[in-house]
Image: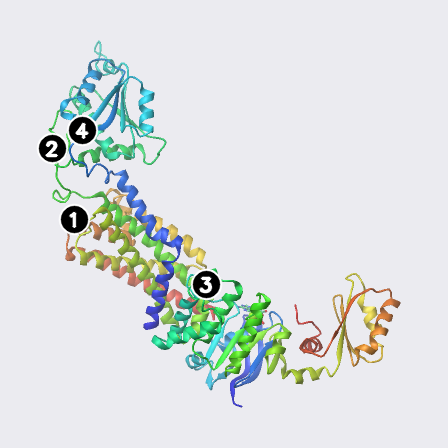
Amino acid sequence: MLKTFIIGFKDLKLAFRDRAALILMLAAPFLVTVGMGLVTGRFSGTDQSGALNIPVVVVNLDNDAIGNALVEVFNSSELADLLEPTASSDAEAARRQVDEDQIVAAIIIPAGFTQSVIPTNGVASSPIQIEFYANPSRPTSAGIIKTILDGFLARIDEMQIGGLTSITQLIASGKISPQEANQAGAEMGKRFEAGGTTYAETAAIKINSSTTATETNDFDPLAFFAPSMALMFLMYTVSYGGRSILAEETQGTLPRLLATPTTSVQILGGKIFGIFLTGLAQMLILIGASSLFFQLKWGDALGVVLLVCAAVFGATGWGLLITALARTPAQVGSVGTAVMLIFAVLGGSFFQLSNMPPIMQAFSKITPNAWALDGFSTLALGGKLAAIAPPITALLTMGLILFLISAALFGKKNLAQK
Amino acid sequence: MANILEVQNLVKNYGAFQAVKGVSFNIQEGEIFSLLGPNGAGKTTTISMLSTLYQPTSGDAQIAGHSIVKEPMQVKRAIGVVPQELALYEDLSAKENLVFWGQMYGLSGKALSARVDEVLEQIGLTDKARDKVKTYSGGMKRRVNIGVGLLHKPRLLFMDEPTVGIDPQSRRAILDTVKDLNQHGMTVLYTTHYMEEAEELSNRVGIIDHGELIAIGTQKELTKQVGENETLLLHIGEQEEPAALATALKGLPNVLDINVVNAEISVVTSSAKDILASVVGAANARGIKIHSIDIREPNLEAVFLHLTGRALRD
Ligand SMILES: Nc1ncnc2c1ncn2[C@@H]1O[C@H](COP(=O)(O)OP(=O)(O)O)[C@@H](O)[C@H]1O
Ligand SMILES: [Mg+2]
């Protein structure tokens, strides 16, 4: 037993000395989480109070009724604290200013816009689109502008006139797809909080003035991304650990261990314990870091710890199965990476499971990701220990079954070798 | 003296291939015993069976009175193993490696840390103890590899070709360490394909070839097999035809045996001095150019040559 612990802690130490492993265990999930946070605008605009003065350029090439009305909206006194609009007639220059991050967005009202939306002689020509050119690295601010624009266009819609906008992506940053930007912008505009200052609802804009996310029980997007990414890269860690089992053989330390008065059960037990410890350390560090840096609320502490243990246990089972089936450390590595990605998709680490076809939802049950993610969501939304009993039970059962299968496979392998 | 190791008819088959073909020998407490043989002779396989890593196909051995087949745990406690290939955690320091392996041998607490410091001193790595093994030179790694085998003060130490592929100084240091360990009472089973190492270190030598122990004894006993004779080694050009010359040399007085390996003719003689002139004459008479001539005193190389008709080295 003691030797099992010693081997396990030795492996924990080795994992934390392996720079490549550290990058994938800790840096990657953390950075992807931060990235997701940026895309969803989690970090911008939350600390400012009072005036925001978001710089925006309105290029009115229309110079007709509707175009002028839109310019007026942007220059209205109600929005004075929020926006810092500049008029321009050079669309190219405005786009360039966005590219260079001098302004958050450019709204380009094309010539003939009014004509195109107001049917003349009873025939509506196909409407020309207003161009909304935004900087995706400022999703919150861009989202606010987009919201104002949408409000205005909705009003035109009410007038039975079709209004369309298009968001042109910044090619330079290339971070998000148009759909994402659109969604992100709209959503984050709603989430905007301006230090308690409530902006009167105008006909054109509607800015949510809820005070804090927790009070309204708003689901923080990071509460989804942080566990998703941690679980995805937990699968990396368990296959890394599995690889180290085979590596002991190739680097000669397994025969050497077997030449010491240590049984093979103690050695395998130690290796498994090492995988579990490493996964546990990884998860706890990631959870700690997201709580510390993003003030992310994971929910009931005991529940989180128990769920993490169960998730790591289930994932370790998969790591062992991969190892038992593979012949070389390299095979464990490549199969492990494939499983990591498949499980991440299948387990809902990228897309909410509820949006997936039923067959996928059924298959997701074989992944530790899906069960654990379910548990983390429950906890983040205020669920208590009892509420996460099903995922914990599922994860433990999964781990146990995989342990038994792997043990049988390992036994067979050893017999074949001797 | 009592035997610490007794081997009876040890056999190891890898599938249809017989790597060790019924080896028997004893090692006495306190001696250095060398297994000398070329690559592929079966040295590592033999050591692996003795250290209980491989199950013998048949046969058995007793180490400190315990059967390697029936009481592997007792055997493991009695032996230390220095494998041919490095077996260390390169991301751990020398000290961390020693501590870990010491724990695997059941050491702990003060006894462990005292012993680790002692071994570090012994392998000359006290100063570098905290550096990661992967930053070490080949020779330093080999020393750590040896150190791991010494931690629990085994009664019998297996060293499998511990000097392969390292610089002369490191090799010197390792040979001195082996002698030092032995002087402090450790029994050593040392394998090598270097005749000089076997000659320098061992009390007794077993010569192994193709899985068979073909000779065993002290160096004196073994060289006696080839008599007080010397060996003349003639290196001739690759394109020359050695067969005719070999036949001619066989007829010379005082020539006892002739072996031809590629472009090398070895002439076993009772007196190298006396036949030198006639050997050169015979070569000249046939227009065969001799590149160089070595005179070898009787040694283990000659014994191996005598027994197998081949040189030790490959
Ligand atoms: N695991 C194995 N499977 C099959 N053949 C092996 C294996 N290990 C060694 N051999 C063969 O057994 C013979 C003896 O090998 P070995 O004991 O390593 O020799 P040595 O240590 O004297 O160089 C060699 O011919 C080698 O190719
Ligand atoms: Mg060998």
**Residues at marks 1 and 4, common chain?**
yes
x and y, in percent, of residue A403 in the image? 32, 64
Contact between marks 1 and 3 (CB within 8 A): the answer is no
Tell me if residue B16 can be seen.
Answer: no
Residue lying farthest front? B127
Q: Quadrant of residue B108?
A: bottom left
What label sits on residue B133 in the rendered view? 3
Q: Is residue A234 above or below residue B249?
A: above
Residue at figure coordinates x 60%, y 70% from the top left: B40
Q: Which residue is mark 4?
A: A82
Q: Which residue is mark 2?
A: A198
Q: Which structural element holds mark 4?
A: loop
The answer to which of B229 and A379 lies nearer the viewer is B229
**Residues at marks 1 and 3, common chain?**
no
The answer to which of B267 and A150 lies nearer the viewer is B267
Q: Is residue A171 left or right of residue B266?
A: left
